[in-house]
Image: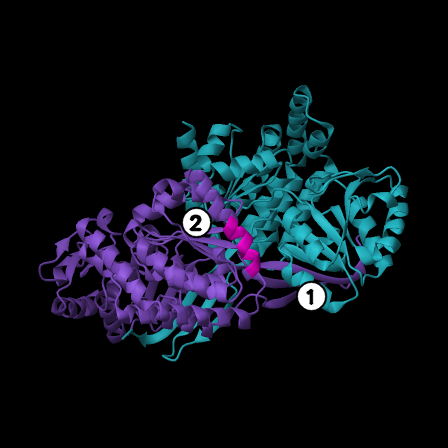
Chain colours: A cyan, B purple
Amino acid sequence: MSQDLAQQIAKRAADAAHAVATLSEQEKNAVLQKMANAIRAHKDEILKVNETDMKTGKEKGLSDAMMDRLHLTEERVEGMATAIEEIIDLKDPVGDSYLLEERPNGLKIEKMRIPLGVICMIYEARPNVTADAGALCFKSGNAVILRCGREAIESSKAIADALHEALEQSGLPKDVITVVPTPDREVMTELLQQKDYIDLVIPRGGEGLIHFVSDTSKIPVIQHYKGVCHLYVDKDADLDKALAILLNGKTQRTGVCNALEGLLVHQDIADKFLPMAAKALAEKDVTIHACNKSVGYFDGADEISVDDFGQEYLALEIAVRTVDDFDGALEHIKRFGSGHTEVIVTENDQTAKRFIREVDSAVTMANASSRFSDGGQLGLGAEIGISTSKLHAYGPMGLQALTTEKFVVTGNGQIRD
Amino acid sequence: MSQDLAQQIAKRAADAAHAVATLSEQEKNAVLQKMANAIRAHKDEILKVNETDMKTGKEKGLSDAMMDRLHLTEERVEGMATAIEEIIDLKDPVGDSYLLEERPNGLKIEKMRIPLGVICMIYEARPNVTADAGALCFKSGNAVILRCGREAIESSKAIADALHEALEQSGLPKDVITVVPTPDREVMTELLQQKDYIDLVIPRGGEGLIHFVSDTSKIPVIQHYKGVCHLYVDKDADLDKALAILLNGKTQRTGVCNALEGLLVHQDIADKFLPMAAKALAEKDVTIHACNKSVGYFDGADEISVDDFGQEYLALEIAVRTVDDFDGALEHIKRFGSGHTEVIVTENDQTAKRFIREVDSAVTMANASSRFSDGGQLGLGAEIGISTSKLHAYGPMGLQALTTEKFVVTGNGQIRD
């Protein structure tokens, strides 16, 4: 049963993918505008159904954070419509091509961007992902299968109804955007076996969900486990800049994957910088976990050993370590970084360049806050997720990460000797 | 035991990957030249050990084709060394960067090419893959784990000994290139679970091997199942070009994945083209399987029904179908193509463009032979494999497909509001 349902959903999406793959940007934008309009037109139904989800969520004792993610208001529904309109403004990458080479035999070799095909999003309680991911996948010429958690499923279906109305008005099959009608884990497991029909799986949620999906899937999975981001303050740093970047990274917003979780300080400037850091972090009530060389600079800091580094606090807490030199910082990041975002503050261009080249993370920064590490801030427009694994996409994923390239060969009758 | 060995191999490769990731192109080229020299210097040992593999292969009753792939001669060993020298001439993509955007807040956003990390190649009887893949992965800054079949394992180890000599002379860890010392399937299975250490798996071999690897692996796998390539002769085709491309695609070499397996002919030119094709194919002793509309043009052709299309013959055989129109050709390719290579012959630019845009395959061609669909002919230099799945790489994979891109952000102290 689960297997039949999963296969049917996947197969229909794969058939529908061809219908959207060859639409022009103009055609896709017209449909997206209809989607935004339909979301607005169906606002009342969406809000009503969301009340049901909220009631069930309350009965099940969802956490406050979870309830907040689930909750839709008039403003948030309008926000979904506006987000779709912002996707209209993003440039469609499909069809972009560039010349690789003109061969000695006269063959012209180009590469051309094409959609991936069918994308499966797996997420938990956020109903707005249904609209966002639906619109992003559509704009990039893909069909999408949306599998949301039990908590948000009725809201997601109501949102999908609005999107389907827009598809039907445009003469497109509604299988271009499918909400999996049941939260059963078995159906999800079977979906993850449909490698003949689905091209990519993007899970968004807790580490448990992501491990489950990537262990179960026979389809490639974009992995985004966690963000353990470091700031390294070099001996040649401008310490005022370093302090501002430290405070911004740690305290501007704490529950996010691009917040700072570790501070590394070159020993030559520890005597100057750590007292500044101690004062500023204390004012923001940040709890300090520090190595034996750093701990003395902080009031009430907790001394930790090397094995205790690498925590993702997602709170007003930070780990501090004094390192011998640049290489010590690199070693620390290599061992404890999560491949998300790493920052150096230095006025020395050579040191900055070496850091950028040698540090292995999706985003490497010099003299800027880790909080800029998201699709919007990097200029990608809306992002569908962040990849901390390297295959296909590494870092924030915008429209282009939902496409791939094929080879195009043009000749005038060439054959091979 | 298998698990320990697999994890140890993977972990060591991951550690060694950092040593090669940050080498300059010049440094890598110097090591590659040492590798080529070492292969030449160890020619006698390699040939001697290959005799052992050949003897064992003979006792086990390997097919002639398999024995031929396994067999090394003086010339073939020299060919391995030369192939490494050709890789020296390929441009290193690592470190290439380009500007994405300058943000209103002054942040400069770039993308920079970096190695993937650790690549695991799984192959059968070809010992030369050990040298080729070892050198390609090295040039692109990756560590590589080479798992070859039982047949070729002693030859592969001897080749790896030569490569290791070059690594050691250069002060690099030999774990940069590892030949798995045992052909046990259990060890391979355990290797395919090491997703914390290995970034990409590339299987090369029969469909059975590739299915086993992609079903077993928790690491992303580049899939290359088969090549069912079509030639579509449009109503506006130059029929002489079409005939030359047909013969070249079907008969220049048959046992390869870029050979033609299907001919589609627009009904308006069937009366002219099919008799030409029938005569030329008969001269080359090509067996014809044809639809009911085409079968009459061929002597001794075998009539087949729609469900019989889509075979990968890898022999002097071809399936022929007369289609109503362009859309009929597209429908056929959508149903029976394998995502490898599809060719149109037409003098009509609009039709060629539509074909190139709408056909979903890794390589789409207008007016050229499908036999050009390989890395060397497309100008990539040596290829490590061909991907017929879309994620990360689609089509022939050269050095660039062994790398990924990270984001680089440069500021002068910017923080987020």
Say what amino acid the circle numbered 1 marks: Lys
List x then y, in percent, for residue B17: 54, 56
Res B104 quadrant in image: bottom right
- Circle 2 crowding by C-alpha within 10 Å: few under 14, some 14–19, many from 20: many
In the rendered structure, find residue A353 and report the number of the disc placed on it.
Answer: 1
User: Magenta span: helix, strand or loop, mainly?
Assistant: helix
Q: Residue at x 14, y 60 (%)?
A: B287
Residue type of the residue flagged with mark 2: Val
Say which of A297 and B261 sits in front: A297
The chain identifier of the residue carrying mark 1 reads A
The residue that mark 2 highlights is B221
Please give the range of residues in magenta: B12-19
Residue A201: tell me if it is visible.
yes
| Residue B17 colored in magenta in the image | yes
Is residue A38 shown left or right of residue B221? right
SS of the residue at dot 2? loop
Q: Viewed as shown, does residue A86 lie left or right of B140?
A: right
Is label 2 on the same chain as label 1? no
The N terminus of chain B - image quarter: top left
Observer-nearest of B30 and A341:
B30
Please tell me which residue is depicted at 40% across the width and 60% down the height of the picture: B161
Q: Residue at x 31, y 75 (%)?
A: A413
Which residue is the extreme one toward the top?
A59
Query: Is residue B319 visible in the rendered structure shown here?
Result: no
Count of numbered marks: 2
Classify B339 as above or below B372. above
Distance of label 2 from label 1 (alpha carbons): 33 Å
Check the image and report above or below for B317 versus A3: below
Seen at 39% across and 67% down, the residue is: B375
